[in-house]
Image: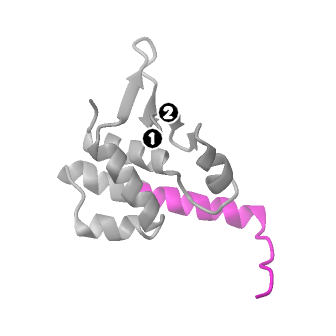
Amino acid sequence: TPARAPLPPAFLMDDLVHVDNLLDSVLAVVRERGKITETEMASLLNITTQKTLDHALEIVERSLVTKVVCESSGRSFFEARGRSKDHYVCLKNHCSCDAFAYQVVTGKENYCKHMLACRIADALGNFP
């Protein structure tokens, strides 16, 4: 198969904004309903792979996401634990895991499992 030509940076940025807006919309519904229905699952699969979604949901179900809020500023970030028991710091569009560097930054994935888990846990209010 022929190599795919690189996309112009403006297109990539527009695409990322679209994906993030879609995730925000889906998670707003999840937040409102307090659960993820089949409709939201189908929408999530438009922006990530089944494998990444399954792993993210496992992290949420096992209560491996912690929200850290600074008392003085109210700013927050998340900490997610993976299968290896390592802790990763997650912001809305960043994770300290290797998959973020190798899969997300390179454009192979939109989110790593930790980022997605943190966003889902936040929508569900599912923290230990």
For the N terminus, the quadrant is bottom right
Residue 8 position within the rendered picture, expressed as x and y whole percent measured from the top left: 78, 67
Other residues around mark 1 within 10 Å, as few (<14) / some (14–19) / many (≥20) = some
| Left-right relation of 73 to 5 | left
| Above or below for 72 versus 52 | above
Query: Mark 2: which amino acid?
Result: Asp
Residue contact at pointers 2 and 1, CB within 8 angstroms:
yes
Q: What type is the residue that disc 1 sits on?
A: Gly
The residue drawn where x is 54% and y is 63% is 18
| Cα distance in 3D space between marks 2 and 1 | 6 Å
- Residue with the mark numbered 1: 82
Magenta range: 1-23
Answer few, some or many: residues within 10 Å of disc 2's Cα (few below 14, many 20 plus, some between 14 and 19).
few
Residue drawn at x 44%, y 50% is 116
Determine the residue positioned at 62% across, 54% down: 104
- Residue 119 is situated, as x and y percent measured from the top left of the image, at 40, 45
Label 1 element class: loop
Which secondary structure lies at badge 2?
Answer: loop
State whether the magenta stretch is mostly helix, strand or loop. Answer: helix
As rendered, which of 72 and 104 lies closer to the eye? 104
Closest to the observer, 7 or 38? 38
Figure quadrant of the C terminus: top left
| Residue that lies at the very extreme toward the bottom in this rendered image | 1
Q: Within the magenta stretch, is there residue 22?
A: yes
Q: Which residue lies furthest to the top in this view?
A: 72
The residue identified by callout 2 is 86
**In this picture, residue 115 sits left or right of residue 42:** right
Residue 83 percent coordinates (x, y): 43, 43
